[in-house]
Structure formats: C-alpha cells, structure tokens
Image (tube, rainbow, N blue to C red):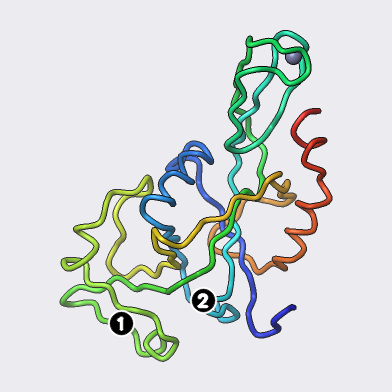
Amino acid sequence: MKNESSSDILIYIGNQYNPTIDHFLEEARNLGCSRHVYRYPKKITIGKSRAFLIHDTKKVIGCRGCGLSTSDVGLEIKICPKCGSTNIFTVMYTEPVIFAYYVIQAAEFIVDDNTKLPKDYEDKGVKPIHIDDVVKKEHLRGCGRRKVGNLYLVSYPNDPIVSLNPTVPYVGEHFRGIKYIEGEQIFNESKTLKQTEAIWK
Ligand SMILES: [Zn+2]
C-alpha cells in the first residue's frame, strides 16, 4: 500500500569515492549507509522512506567462447551457461543504473563543542552525533570521514541494503543532493526487466 506521507528519494553515489557498485555495497554492508544531504528532505519519513542509489559504473561479464555478455551487479560467472567455456572476461563501463536501496533509519547531524544541532533539525528528530565521541572512531568510508555541520541520512550495519536485480537504468542528468521518486515504480521497472533476458543478452 502506498503511504502518502512518506516519499522515497534518489541519491547519486559518486564513482570518485566508490569506484564500483560492489565497492559501495561491501562498504554499506560493513558500515551501514551514510549519505550526505545539503538539507533535510521535507517529504521523507524516518524508518519508512527509502533511499534508492544510482551509480554510473557497471561491470560487464562476457564469454570469449560464444560472445554472450551480462551487465549485472554482483554476478560472478565462472562457466558460460550457453557454451560451457571458462574463458570469461570482465569490463567496466559507464551507464547510470539504480542498483540498491536502504530504508532511512535516522538523520544524523555532526556536532562539536561549537556547532550545535539547529533547532529546526531538533524538531524533526535529527540526532546530534558528536565528532569526538562517534565520528573519529568510525571506520573510514570511501568518501572520507563525516564532517561537522553536515547532515547524513543513515542506515546501520545490521539494516539490510537491498540490491536490485536486475538494476534499473537511470535516465537523466547527474545531480547533487536528492530527488524525490516513486519507489514502487522502480520496483515495477526492475520486475519487468525479466531477469534471464537482462542477464544474458
Ligand atoms: Zn559462451
């Protein structure tokens, strides 16, 4: 059922920090997700809204034996299902795809002794996270350490990040910050791209 009060969002994952989708997913599984946003997205509901993630590097796996190829996330192929060849190669190429999502579990604002949580963020339930207590002890992410005065939409390591398989092509310009989207539409598109057709073309 669609919940009118909570919107889903789209976020671009820069390939300068996370060179591949697998790199991002591995980091997200170990550390949880934490995406910087410039301001609090008014339409989201913490614990409900999903952040769908776009990345524009994709891994293509191909067979030298018969020329079949796949463009898919996290697919490891050792033997070609068509010709049985073990002569498998991988190539990276660039094309934006929506590859995963996480449910936004909290909004965190990084504070220090001089920078306090803004009142309007407090009213929205944003959590103040002190740079000394927490951030300096965090594992380093591809995008570096979280910074004082920045707002992050997070999930924790125990919350699953869900991969879309197949991924959904993203048609549009690269953007910073967030865009609102209809999450169900993304799922429907992923379902209509039939898995077998999408994998081996
Ligand atoms: Zn083959």
Task: Look at label 2 and name its amino acid.
Answer: Gly
Residue lying at 27% horizontally and 67% vertically, measured from the top left = 148
Q: How many marks on residues?
A: 2
> Residue 145: percent from the left, percent from the top?
29, 54
Residue placed under numbered mark 1 in the picture: 117
Which one is nearer the viewer's eye here, 165 or 135? 165
> Residue 153: percent from the left, percent from the top?
45, 68
Rendering quarter of residue 128: bottom left
Q: Secondary structure at mark 2?
A: loop
Direction from residue 102 to residue 174 in the image, left or right: right
Which one is nearer the viewer's eye here, 127 or 68? 68
Ligand 1 closer than 8 Å to the CB at disc 2? no
Q: Secondary structure at mark 1?
A: loop
- Say which quadrant the C terminus sits in: top right
Q: Which mark is residue 52?
A: none
Direction from residue 97 to residue 29 in the image, left or right: left
Q: How much space separates mark 1 and mark 2, taking CA atoms?
A: 21 Å
Residue lying at 46% horizontally and 39% vertically, measured from the top left = 23
Residue lying at 48% horizontally and 76% vertically, measured from the top left = 40
